[in-house]
Image (tube, rainbow, N blue to C red):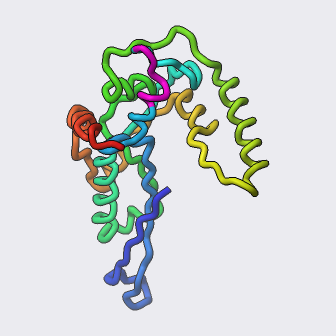
Amino acid sequence: MKIMPAKNTNCKRKGTEASNVLRTVGILPPRMYGELDPTNTISRNGSVRNGIYYRVMGVMNAKLQYSYVGNVAMMFVRAYQSLQNNEKLGGQYYFAVDDSPPQTHIEHRKPYIDENIGISSWFVSHRVVCAVLNIIYFCLLIISPFKKVNFQLSPNVINFVNTTFYVTYEKAKTMFGYTPLYDYKDSVRRTIESLPKVK
């Protein structure tokens, strides 16, 4: 959860003089995509072989919510601007999503890897992957006093790509007028154009 502080020096409470008031809101973004996202290169190198995307993280049929990073940033801006003058926003939380359609993890990756890739008919069981990862993390815990290893994959990631969920930005639109700055096609285009610069 991200915290947005605001200072209001003009707020008067009954029976008191003007005072500073701290108001906060929670901005909750889902998984984001956008310019210079290295995970697209990781997906190409780690999961795609001979034009086939191998389902090594479970069946991966769950529909997921993704948001373009530029639209998430715009929600932070709109929330900050509105929080200065609307005390009713304080103490609320808002999902920082846009008009990106709910997609499976593979559907989401296809434009950035290759639209023509196929999907493997077989997959590694969700439970098996999580069990293997738990063993790996246990081993890393044992060696952690001697060597620190930053392992990218975790059971939380596996659970994420195998659990359907999606939300809307209607609350943010109603409360402080948020609308996405970029539509879905433009968001994808901007992401693809940045890929040659990813290292």
Quadrant where the C terminus is found in the figure = top left
Quadrant position of residue 127:
top right
Quadrant position of residue 162:
top right
- Is 77 magenta? The answer is no
Q: Please report the residue visible at 50 percent of the width from the left and 20 percent of the height from the top.
A: 61
Q: Residue furthest front?
A: 146
- Residue range corresponding to the magenta coloring: 43-50
Residue 10 left/right relative to 25: left
- Is 48 magenta? The answer is yes
- Residue 37: x and y, percent? 37, 42
- Residue 194: x and y, percent? 26, 41
Q: Nearer the viewer, residue 79 or 87?
A: 79
- Looking at the picture, does residue 32 appear above or below residue 127? below
Quadrant position of residue 156:
top right
Residue 77 left/right relative to 106: left
Q: Residue furthest bottom?
A: 17
- Residue 41: x and y, percent? 39, 34
Q: Please report the residue visible at 43 percent of the width from the left and 47 percent of the height from the top.
A: 29
**Magenta segment main secondary structure:** helix
Q: Please report the residue visible at 76 percent of the width from the left and 42 percent of the height from the top.
A: 139
